[in-house]
Image (tube, rainbow, N blue to C red):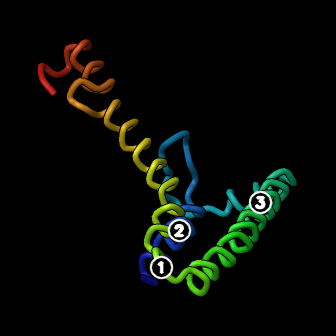
Amino acid sequence: MLFGLAMPLLVLFGLSFWLQDYVDFIKTFSLQNYSNFFAKPIYGAILMKSIRISGMVTLVTVLLAYPMAYFIAFRIKSNKLVWLILITVPFWTSYLLRVFAWKLMLGYNGVVNSGLKSLGLISEP
């Protein structure tokens, strides 16, 4: 689990030393990204704003989650599963909406296949 959490951070740290040309990386070591970060104050302001927003979201989540977890764990004697399902249903709907959106784009008659067929690049999905 530590590897799964640390690896993306290590990759991101490694990529921070490479330059970027639109969507391509120039794979030479450079400190230019860091000099740009410290030279322009807007980057620091954006970083602080992102940290502040993530901190507020974490605080609100903890303040809402712990009382609910306490209530379910110690006050509810029966039907705990029903309460847990009622709490997680909104997350399921979000997941289902994303699945349907991907299906519309990548399905057999989706946007991608229809576009490729109309361009003559493929004859069938």
103 or 87, which is in the foreground?
A: 87
Rendered image quadrant of residue 31 = bottom right
> Residue 14 shows which numbered tag?
2
Q: Position of residue 55 (x, y in %)?
A: 76, 68
In the image, is 125 to the left or to the right of 23?
left
Image quadrant containing the N terminus: bottom left
In the image, is 122 to the left or to the right of 72?
left
> Identity of the amino acid at label 1?
Ser
Return the residue at label 1.
Answer: 78
Q: Position of residue 90 (x, y in %)?
A: 52, 53
Instruction: State the residue lying farthest toward the bottom.
Output: 74
Inter-mark Cα distance, 2 to 3? 26 Å
Residue at 42%, 76% in the rendered image: 4
Label located before the other in sequence (1 or 2) = 2
Q: Secondary structure at mark 3?
A: helix
Inter-mark Cα distance, 1 to 2? 51 Å
> Identity of the amino acid at label 2?
Gly
Give the foreground label among 2 and 3: 3
Q: Secondary structure at mark 2?
A: helix
Rendered image quadrant of residue 22 = top right
Give the foreground label among 1 and 3: 1
Return the residue at label 3.
Answer: 53
Pointer 2 with pointer 3, Cβ within 8 A: no
Pointer 1 with pointer 3, Cβ within 8 A: no
> Identity of the amino acid at label 3?
Ile
Residue at 54%, 71% in the rendered image: 9
In the image, is 104 to the left or to the right of 95?
left
Inter-mark Cα distance, 1 to 3? 37 Å
